[in-house]
Image (spheres, rainbow, N blue to C red):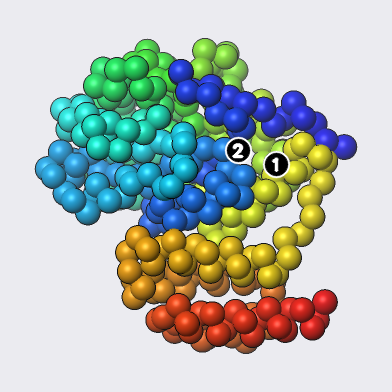
Amino acid sequence: MSDNSLFHPVSIGNVSISGNVFLAPVAGYSDAAFRSICRSCGAAFTYTEMVSAEALFRGSGKTENLMRRAEGEVPFAVQLFGGSPESMSAAVGITLDRVHPEVIDINAGCPVPKIVKGGAGSALTHNPEALHAVVGAAVKAAGSVPVTVKIRSGWDADHLSWKEAALAALDAGVAAITMHPRTRAQGYEGKSDWTLLAALVKLVDGRVPVFGSGDLFSAEDARRMLTETGCDGVMFARGAMGNPFIFTETRDLLTKGAFSPIPSETRLKTGMHELELLIADIGEVAACREMRKRFCCYTKGITGAAALRPRIVQCSTLSEYKQIFNELIVKSTISN
């Protein structure tokens, strides 16, 4: 049975979004090419990978490239990270001036040591006063553009500060809160505690939307998170890596009660389209190198793919990929 109430439009401030199944910011993965593919597969909203506010403030052209909007990517959000209210304010101004996102998101959850050391990422969840200052500076600089925040559950099991962080973010004027209910100490290990996400929903009590992330690797996981926590939407991160079809499957499950397996040929053609988009953005050599890891995910479960992966991870040209995938399509067709 479907439950259409689980799939619904959401509003982030003055921005209306057609559905509540999102692509999270994924460092090193959420480039314009991948975001474009996820949108075509049913992601209602997409975020750039996190962008350094300090680097933007200092004029890094490479950093600015991370923010480029994909063709037809409306609406979209740019996620910024930083520990300084001054650089965050300047970075928000630069972002709005150059790429005009519909939403600015502040990363207060990244557990990577070099990010935390600079007072950014999950250091902000650990320090609600600093979070309030950084988010407040962003809200002031953003004007009518909504600012959102993504938090962790806390520093470690003995220091769960999500409640204080959420209240600080609300007081600073955020338009939505996303929680990844793992601590900074957990990183991406262990299990995320969805009961904390449910508690956050209760705490916020409808003042702004609450979105959930963490341990979402299937359409069934998304349905379970929405049902168990009452959150307003879900963000796929690692679950979408090399598997943009998770958005198609989730929307179908929530609206129709079931979904059909994605044909092997469709998976391969979608991956090739992503490669072509990436080549247009960064050139053939860099794109082919980047797609090696992504194609290992795209080909998971496809007949004959395991035997060809040693060749996939050596591919350097578009023609090499085409040759391998033509072979896979033939093998898959024969097996079916």
The tag earlier along the polypeptide, 1 or 2, is 2
Q: Image height check: is 81 above or below 328?
A: above
- For residue 98, which quarter of the picture? top left
Q: Position of residue 95 (x, y in %)?
A: 26, 35
In the image, is 30 to the left or to the right of 199? left
Give amino acid for label 2.
Val
Query: Contact (CB < 8 A) between labels 1 and 2?
Result: yes
Q: Position of residue 12 (x, y in %)?
A: 49, 23
Q: Which residue ends up furthest to the left in the rendered image? A: 58
Q: Is residue 130 visible?
A: no
Q: Image height check: is 247 above or below 180?
A: below
- For residue 87, which quarter of the picture? top left
In the image, is 57 to the left or to the right of 188? left
Q: Image height check: is 129 above or below 296?
A: above
Residue at x 55% of width, y 85% of height: 323
Give amino acid for label 1.
Arg
Q: Which residue ends up furthest to the right in the rendered image? A: 1
Residue 251 numbered mark, or none? 1
In terms of secondary structure, where does tag 1 sit? helix
Mark 2 closeness class: few <14, some 14–19, many ≥20 residues within 10 Å: many
Residue at x 27% of width, y 31% of height: 96
Cα distance, mark 1 to mark 2?
A: 8 Å
Q: Which residue is mark 2?
A: 21
